């Protein structure tokens, strides 16, 4: 994940301070929204939370390694992992698993592009997408 996006997640959500991120930049907004929901839920409860690793599984699905004894947090994590199944790994827009090996989820625009490195302009767009949510 881009260092600016990574820093934004860690800076806005202290429970992620020791968490490792191995996710594509395009899933930043999905992750950020989930962390907002989890943070809101934690403010309503006295549960402790432990975030380990947030990563991409071999089948291009999202894995959120957060330990918390709360069914609502578990539901948020499950829904977020489902959202990522159809979100482009480069830009976050609607995508699908790319054939032949289904190791990536990409939209039509990024289907034939190496999305391992994004531009600063794309990073700005991702941060702007969450900034409209009051953060």
Image (cartoon, rainbow, N blue to C red):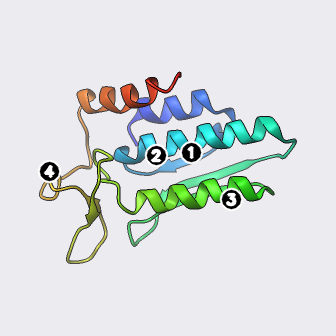
Residue 34, label in figure = 1
Q: Residue at x 49, y 57 (%)?
A: 55
Q: CA distance from mark 3 to mark 1?
A: 11 Å
Residue corresponding to mark 2: 30
Residue 24 in the image: x percent, y percent? Answer: 37, 50
Q: Nearer the viewer, residue 104 or 2?
A: 104
Q: Which callout, 2 or 4, points at the residue further toward the start of the chain?
A: 2
46 in relation to 81, above or below: above
Q: Secondary structure at mark 4?
A: loop
Residue corresponding to mark 3: 74
Classify 10 Å Cα crowding around label 2: few (below 14), some (14-19), many (20 and above): some
Residue 88 in the image: x percent, y percent? Answer: 30, 53
Residue 112 in the image: x percent, y percent? Answer: 12, 58
Question: Is residue 67 shown to the viewer in this render?
Answer: no
Classify 10 Å Cα crowding around label 4: few (below 14), some (14-19), many (20 and above): few
Q: Secondary structure at mark 2?
A: helix
Q: Are marks 2 and 1 in contact (CB under 8 Å)?
A: yes
Residue 102's quadrant in the figure?
bottom left
């Amino acid at each position: 994940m881009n260092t600016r996006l990574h820093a934004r997640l860690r800076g806005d959500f202290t429970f992620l301070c020791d968490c490792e991120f191995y996710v594509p930049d395009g899933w930043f907004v999905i992750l950020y929204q989930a962390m907002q929901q989890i943070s809101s839920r934690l403010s309503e409860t006295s549960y402790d939370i432990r975030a380990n690793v947030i990563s991409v599984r071999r089948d291009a699905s999202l894995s959120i390694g957060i330990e918390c004894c709360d069914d609502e947090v578990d539901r948020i994590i499950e829904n977020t992992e489902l959202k990522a199944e159809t979100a482009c790994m480069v830009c976050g827009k609607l995508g699908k698993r790319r054939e032949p090996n289904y190791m990536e989820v990409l939209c039509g625009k990024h289907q034939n592009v190496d999305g391992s490195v994004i531009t600063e302009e794309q990073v700005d767009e991702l941060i702007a997408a969450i900034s409209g949510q009051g953060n």
